[in-house]
Amino acid sequence: MPPLAGGPHADLDRRDCAEAVSETKKTDADVTTAPDERDILLRVEGLQKHFPIRKGVLQRQVGAVKAVDGIDFEVRKGETLGVVGESGCGKSTMGRVITRLQEPTGGSIHFEGQDITRLNAAGMRPLRRDIQMIFQDPYGSLNPRHTIGGIVSAPFRLQGVEPEGGVKREVQRLLELVGLSPEHYNRYPHEFSGGQRQRIGIARALALKPKLVVADEPVSALDVSIQAQVVNLMDDLQEELGLTYVIIAHDLSVVRHVSDRIAVMYLGKIVELADRTSLYEAPMHPYTKALMSAVPVPDPKRRGAKSERILLRGDVPSPISPPSGCRFHTRCWKATEICKTTEPQLVELRPGQRVACHHPENFADQAPQDTVLLSVAKEAAELVAEEVRAESAKTSAAVAAVAAGSAEETGAEAAGKTADTAEKPEAEVAADVEATGAKTGPGAKTAPAAPLKTGEATTEPETERQDPTDK
Ligand SMILES: Nc1ncnc2c1ncn2[C@@H]1O[C@H](COP(=O)(O)OP(=O)(O)OP(=O)(O)O)[C@@H](O)[C@H]1O
């Protein structure tokens, strides 16, 4: 680990550091009780991002990709909000819209109480200092023709900021802060490994001392052993600088250890939003349960034990014409008629735990009168054996070690061991946040494999529900 306390960066101009540090370590009580309005950094209400689909010579709009389709949440000062969901469910779009790299098509975004939903580029300019984004691809997001010094100093140039002591000194201090050598200033991205490049991306994001950092899959492109180091770095920097994070990931293996609260997205909607402990101990949405079952808990005592993993059948439906009612009903093993006809609202069923489900897990049925399972429910999921879970065990174990504070940063990766490979990324993703839509399409992550056997997957008895085909 880089020496975060003291050292050459100790004079870093820490924004309300003492206050912020105390904010960063949230207790369960902090995250389950309703926050004071002054503790809210970002508030999103009814947020929508629909991409129009146009056809013909006249380019008439014939439909829309409803990437984000009406979501509400708030981000509290100093917290880490994890956002998870399968590929294509709208996480990245949500991230780009809340940082205003893309225009929302509906709803509102308030940052520190200020409505920023419709601010134009000039209006957003001062806020670019406060809201930064870290991108998934450490290869594509750094301009291969620019030196590290040029890349990390770009935000200063764009904002017309002259740091005390000069740009070069500040950039070198930032490099040290993220565990790189100040001597890397004149080197090029291709000389660095993936983990080091992500550190460079983090240094760039932190240059203007932002309040909110939105990290879109910050470690998923990295080797498992490096993922833990980068997660650890982000965690340390949060404490050091009083940052607030929104961390986007396609599964729970990373965010489970670093988030105070977690929002689970499915097809443009938030289906569950809860503090980490509640989500892990008693997930309420069947989709959350399926996502969680895909992340093994490394425990030698349980080796050989049979535990359930829910594999959802089929892909996420198209966001162009999402299923009626509850969007998850076509893949849910608990779906009944009401799920098909009526959209469940995101409501707080337990303090700090909001869920949008008619038949939640670990809680009273919200539509007990509706007992007949849809035929699709019978084949919605299947249980698989423990061994299948091994594939993601490495990631989870590595990150868990970090969370437990036992991960030893070797420093080898951080201290400047440059990569041998000299391949250059083709993409020239903008090196600054002003370049909108840095990631223009969905990433190529794999969705959790789908499929399973009904009933067995659920923990609560399904006795009162009948399958119509059994009649
Ligand atoms: N610029 C765009 N134009 C049209 N459709 C888009 C655009 N960007 C994203 N989409 C669509 O919006 C939906 C959500 O994409 P998004 O990238 O936000 O999902 P995601 O959950 O982040 O997935 P991934 O993890 O694969 O990036 C997808 O169906 C995607 O194809």
Image (cartoon, rainbow, N blue to C red):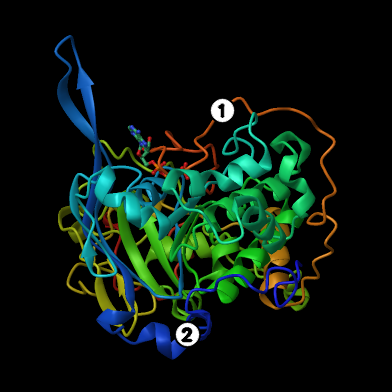
Residue 76, position in %: x, y? 37, 74
Relative depth, front residue between 389 and 195 = 195
Position of the N terminus by quadrant: bottom right
Say which element carries label 2: helix
Q: For this rendering, which residue is in front, 315 or 403?
A: 403
Secondary structure beneath disc 1?
A: loop
Front-most of residues 263 and 231: 231
Q: Is residue 167 left or right of residue 360?
A: right
Where residue 404 appears, as percent x and y from the top left, is 70, 78
Is 63 placed above or below 97 here?
Answer: above
The quarter of the picture showing ligand 1: top left
* Mark seen at residue 19: 2
Residue furthest to the bottom in view is: 29
In the rendered structure, which amino acid carries the disc numbered 2?
Answer: Glu
Check disc 1 and give the amino acid type.
Answer: Ala
Lateral position of residue 250 relative to residue 105, left or right: right
Q: Residues within 10 Å of mark 1 (few under 14, many from 20)?
A: few
| Rendered position, 362 above or below 138 | below
> Residue placed farthest to the front in the image?
165
| Neighbourhood count class around disc 2 (C-alpha, 10 Å): few under 14, some 14–19, many 20 upward | few
* Residue pictured at 64% horizontal, 73% vertical: 11
Quadrant in which the C terminus appears: bottom left
Between disc 1 and disc 2, the foreground one is 2
Report whether 344 appears left or right of 147.
left
Would you identify the image quadrant in which residue 287 lies? Answer: bottom left
How many numbered discs? 2
The residue wearing badge 1 is 427
Visible residue check, residue 287: yes
Q: Marks 1/2: CA distance?
A: 40 Å
